[in-house]
Amino acid sequence: MSGNLFEDTDSILSEERIFPPTSEMVAQANITAYMESKGFSDYDSFYKWSLENRFEFWDDMAKKLHWFEPWTNTFEWTNKPFFKWFTGGKLNIVYNCLDRHIQTPTRHKVAFHWEGDDGQTRSLTYEQLYILTNRFARGLQQLGVKKGDRVAIYMPAILEQIVAVLAVARLGAVHTVVFGGFAANSLRDRIIDAEAKVVITADGNYRGGKLIQLKKITDEAVLETPTIEKVLVVKHLGLDISLQEGRDVYWHDLAADIPEDTFVPCEPMDSEDLLFILYTSGSTGKPKGVVHVHGGYAVGAATTTNFVFDLKDEDIYWCTADVGWVTGHSYIIYGPLMNGATSVLFEGVPSYPNPDRWWSVIEKFKVTVLYTSPTGIRGLMRFGEEWPAKHDLSSLRLLGSVGEPINPEAWIWYRHNIGRDELPIMDTWWQTETGSILISPTIIQPLKPGSATRPLPTIEADVVDKNGQSVGLGKGGFLIVRHPWPSQMRTIYGDPARYITYWETLPDVYFAGDAATIDQEGFIRVQGRVDDVIKVSGHRLGSMEIESSLVSHPAVAEVAAIGKPDPVKGEHVKVFVILKNGFEPSPELEKELKLHVRTSVGALAVPDELEFTPSLPKTRSGKIMRRVIRAKELGEPIGDTSTLDG
Ligand code: WTA
């Protein structure tokens, strides 16, 4: 984000509107029941208590889950910053998602209603999901998957994607889900880094009516991945694909010999055993494999789903994210399943075939809780109020937002047109690294448009300067979190040094990489990244990833990629390209370079703007100054340029 982010505090300081909860919301809230059990009737005093009693709070939360063996220590931090939670405990997150519910009436409840891109639907009860997961786990065992192995999942938003994730974790293997919009190179790099043994994919899928040939892309990726032994393919569309003898197997062929009553016990995992690796972009270098574990992650995801979305037995919950991102892991799969919720899984896009697709899904399934992104809202705002107005959205009772700052205008539109001017909006701040939501209102707290409001219980967030000193109310600075929490990432896979930087950029606090302010009334507003991470439509990209893709093109000598403010996407990518001698700028070359990014990284990384330039500002040591390029581009003050060339 821009260099003068910290000065850009006008809109929050002038944002006076406050939306208090109704007494009915407060009375029925899940968090109210817990607060009362601790003797509190208001959030602020409860929150203060939680800061001083964090282990009691997390013990209480962990006790709500099923453990094969209880933990002996709630928290251990002997080898800073490699902390551990619930040590000595044994559990499996999947037991908490499925097996536990099979023993209760939840068994017959729908776990997922699925709607495909083309409008077909299919639902699975908890029992059906349990049966499928057991069979899938047996299939994976037959392919040689065992505890600790890494399995890549490159699939569309279909029910088998959920089954695949749960089956891998059931066996104690480690999943690494790769977003289905990434290109072959991106899939290949993630498989190589995780040393995955098996990749699970589908023949292909449609998104917004566009065919994506997942198996073909997988074939290309695994040409260069020495660790992949098997490719397991789910037939989704019935495309004519080729299967490589001895390596590739269709799920339905494998399943033919696996009986319905197959039972594969959940592997008892240590709290600190790996659950998944999820790759995300950093400010430098290649994407990093964020590691999460069974114990703390389960406790964090289950707790926040329960308190923030306030789920009740009769709710129909829909998170519009993709399982390929962390929001899909925590708030499509694990959090809702641990809470025994009924969810919607949607394969399509918001505007296909018409810009009321989402609203029709809400009407069809009578969705009560909707969790979506600012980009989704802004994108649909453009088409006008008449689209949501065509649908009966009266089932909704709570709204959520995630992934990027939501501007007050979009917040108000969301509340007015989707929330009939009465529904609360949970603006949830968190990251792949945090595992679950850290800053967000709950249904019992006052709201302010554009603000994630306050930290959740036990989370001590602050805004500080470059020396780690609190900047005070109304001033901009770096967002930090002062103490570890259970669902925090444990390391960066294969690169612990990169993990340590999160806790050492400023001594002993977690450095989030975001700029933020806290206003006079204590409302936090997160403004965006302070590093070279670009949030395009809420998708996290690194400047370096786009630059490395472009410099691999024969015409390109040097590149700088920056994020520019975008009225719909939040940010879009602009690249500045220096061509090699002998190449001339042309509209054809521009097209070719954009296509190059699409085929090497993925459609989500394609720059909206590309400018050919003869030179780029550099430091004396030759490093391209993205900060300066961005400031110039946005017409902002350039700041200190004393280390620049000439
Ligand atoms: C941004 C997504 C403002 C932020 C869950 C963060 C937000 C990055 C919000 C993490 C929010 C997420 N308000 N900004 N409510 N939620 N962000 O890892 O910049 O894909 O650092 O995780 O998204 O992105 P990630």
Image: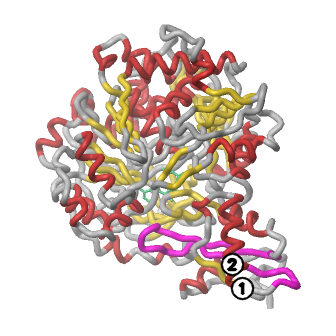
Location of residue 369 (image quadrant): top left
Amino acid type, mark 1: Ser
Marks 2,1: beta carbons within 8 A: yes
The reply, left or right, for residue 618 in relation to residue 202 is: right
Question: The C terminus is located in which quarter?
Answer: bottom right
Question: The N terminus is located in which quarter?
Answer: bottom right
Amino acid type, mark 2: Glu
Residue placed most toward the observer, 67 or 275: 275
- Seen at 40% across and 48% down, the residue is 320
Residue placed most toward the observer, 288 or 461: 288
**Which residue sits furthest left?**
23
For disc 1, the marked residue is 586
Location of residue 40 (image quadrant): top left
Does residue 578 belong to the magenta stretch? yes
Residue stretch rendered in magenta on the structure: 556-583
Instruction: Name above or below for residue 27 compared with residue 134.
Output: below
Does residue 106 belong to the magenta stretch? no
x and y, in percent, of residue 501 in the image: 68, 51
- Does residue 438 appear in this view? no
Instruction: Name above or below for residue 347 compared with residue 12.
Output: above
- Seen at 17% across and 35% down, the residue is 28
Residue placed most toward the observer, 42 or 300: 300
For disc 2, the marked residue is 590
x and y, in percent, of residue 531 in the image: 61, 65
